[in-house]
Amino acid sequence: MEILIPITMFAMIAAIVIAPRWFKSQERQKLQETLRASIEKGATLPPEVIEALTSDVKAPPSPYKDLRSGIVWLGVAVGFAALGFAVSFEEPDAFYPLIGIAAFPGFIGLALIALSFVTRGKN
C-alpha cells in the first residue's frame, strides 16, 4: 500500500506531460482528415492555409497573457500559504517551510505581473 504514493506521483507527472501532446496529435489528425476530405471533393486550398498549417509559430507573448499567468502563480502561492496556515494548527513547525515554498510561485507571479505592466506600453 505504501508504494502507491510514489507510483501515483510519477503517474501524475507522466499524465501532465503526455496528455497535452496526445490531445494536440488528435487535433492535428482531425484537421488532416478534414483537409483530405475537402481535397477529395475537389476543393483547392489557398497558399495561406498551407503556409499556416506547415509553420509551427506560437503567438507572441502579450501583456494580458503575462498578467493572467502571474495571477495564476499568485493563486498557487496563496494556496501553499493557506495550506501552511491550516497545517500549523496541528503541526506548528510546518508553517514556515510551506511559506518558503509559497514564495517561489509568489515571486514568479509578481515577476510576470510586473512584466505585463512593463510590456503593455510597447504594443
Image (cartoon, helix red, strand yellow):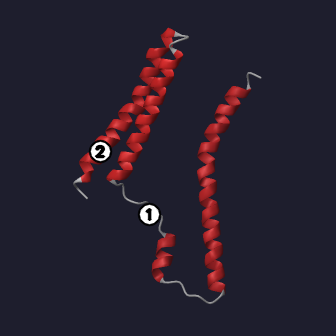
- Using the rendered view, name the quadrant where residue 105 is placed: top left
Q: Residue 119 at what x, y percent from top left?
A: 26, 51
Residue at 61 percent across and 77 percent down: it is 35
Find numbered disc 2 in the image and state the secondary structure of the residue it sits on: helix
Label 1: element kind? loop
- In the rendered image, the residue lying farthest to the left is 121
**Quadrant of the image containing the N terminus:** top right
Q: Which mark is residue 57?
A: 1
Query: Left or right: 117 with respect to 25?
Result: left
> Which residue in the structure is indicated by mark 2?
115
Q: Nearer the viewer, residue 26 or 55?
A: 26
Q: Position of residue 4 (x, y in %)?
A: 73, 27
Q: Is residue 116 above or below residue 10?
A: below
113 vs 85, nearest the viewer: 85
Q: CA distance from mark 1 to mark 2?
A: 22 Å
In percent of the image, x 49 and y 9: which residue is there?
92
Residue 74 percent across, percent down from the top left: 40, 35
Q: Amino acid at mark 1?
A: Val
Give the residue displayed 24% in from the left and 47% down from the top. Answer: 118
Residue extending furthest toward the bottom: 42
Q: Quadrant of the C terminus?
A: bottom left
* Residue 68 horizontal/vertical position (percent): 40, 46
On screen, residue 45 above or below 114: below
**Residue type, mark 2 in image:** Leu
Q: Nearer the viewer, residue 117 or 52?
A: 117
